[in-house]
Amino acid sequence: MATKTILVTGGCGFIGHHFIEHLCINTTWNIVIIDKLSYASMGFDRLRDTGIFDKYSDRVKVFTSDLILPIPEGLVKEMGNVNYIVHMAAETHVTTSIVEPRLFIRNNIDSTVNMLEYARNIPSLEKFFYFSTDEVFGPAHNDTMFKEWDRHKPGNPYSASKSAAEQICIAYENTYKLPIMIVNVMNAFGERQHMEKFIPLCINKITNNETIDIHCYPDGITPGTRFYIHARNIAAAVLFLIDKGVIGEKYNISGKNEITNLDIARRIAAIMGKPGNFRFTADAVDRPGHDVRYGLDGSKLDDMGFNYPVDFEESLDRTIKWTLSHPKWLGNDSDNDKLSLCSFDSYKSNDTLILSDSDDAAGKFLDSDDSLQSDIDINDEMLDKHFNYQCSQSDSCPT
């Protein structure tokens, strides 16, 4: 039986390279990658770092092409018969999409249309996966968890471009009978993530003793939350769906643990053994209309029998430690400093959460007249650490 061939766009990117490595290890397929090698791809560095060029060079081909242009005939010929397409390539940085919305809209829509047009002319094609995001649904207030076919309400140009591309995929599946499936994923993390993303950003800022902005609710003290998922879990889910998924369906690939960005930043600081300085901001200048919570209902995938292979707690700790031991992925080739842990208690005074060495009320937030406001758990061994907070209502913070 002929070996299958899978085409992955954006395969040099963060999630993409984890997926490529997963395919190399868990299949015998031939793998074709198209990537335009923008700043986010970081060249071939991620793929080189995994060792796949050394171990699987006979199975992996990489082509450089910008998908906002139709795929050239010569490239179509070189790729040969393709059985599966996983279209991951996209511009994804929300802040940049707010500054340059036309770039994101053109890139994420035109690249998808060009891939769909290419797919229409592949008789060997069995499945086409469009990679989308939890952000297309907009903010998930309270305990809301969106199901696959719930209405979209994108809140920024990036998510709007992904939502539009989803609708185009649905139209092509209906009109041209393309074998399309759509996956919506949540905040990914893992090794070799670009330094602009939250976890490596925190590592860099803590290393340099800089303040980390924590997006929060309008009250100025309740941090936003995310469902983080390791990129290898996403890769495993897509491979599972290539086998088990139904054409014309959508699937949520959801993180299992909801955690505040403050807790993520605190954990990073604890692992690093360095003090963390955090500032709550309810209205970030660079992220107007920021969504403080997203939520995807992943029960559809669970009911199909998929089990996430990588545990959240363990993979988060391992990712942080791996990144610290590979500083080039932070844009820094020097070793990170190591400081000993120290304990802390947190109190609220006026508009700023400040430090105290007192043991009188460990684990409590107190207001300026010492009346109890709320309980927080700061006695976890992981958070036995020294932190500083600034509230977004202070004069020095945007409001």
Image: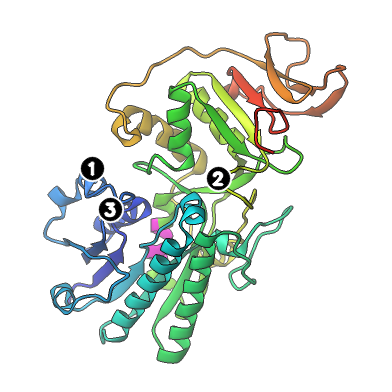
**Sequence order check, earlier mark of 3 and 1:** 3
**Sequence order check, earlier mark of 2 and 3:** 3
Q: Amino acid at mark 1?
A: Asp
Magenta highlight range: 235-240
- Residue 336 falls in image quadrant: top left
Q: Which quadrant of the figure contains the N terminus?
A: bottom left
Secondary structure under badge 1?
helix
Report if the CB atoms under discs 1 and 2 are less than 8 Å apart: no
Can residue 239 be found in the magenta stretch? yes
Q: Amino acid at mark 2?
A: Asp
Query: Disc 1 or disc 2, which is closer to the eye?
Result: 2
Q: Amino acid at mark 3?
A: Glu
Q: Is residue 350 above or below residue 148?
A: above
Query: Disc 2 or disc 3, which is closer to the eye?
Result: 2
For marks 2 and 3, give the CA distance: 34 Å
Task: Tell me what residue is drawn at x 52 percent, y 23 percent.
Answer: 270
Name the main secondary structure of what is drawn in magenta.
helix
Circle number at residue 286: 2
**Sequence order check, earlier mark of 1 and 2:** 1
Q: Is residue 272 above or below residue 399?
A: above
Task: Tell me what residue is drawn at x 58 percent, y 18 percent.
Answer: 385
Is any atom of residue 382 visible in this view?
no
Task: Tell me what residue is drawn at x 74 percent, y 43 percent.
Answer: 218
Circle number at residue 21: 3
Secondary structure under badge 2?
loop
Measured as percent of width and height from the top left, residue 206 is found at 48, 25
| Residue indicated by mark 1 | 49
Measured as percent of width and height from the top left, residue 110 is found at 38, 73
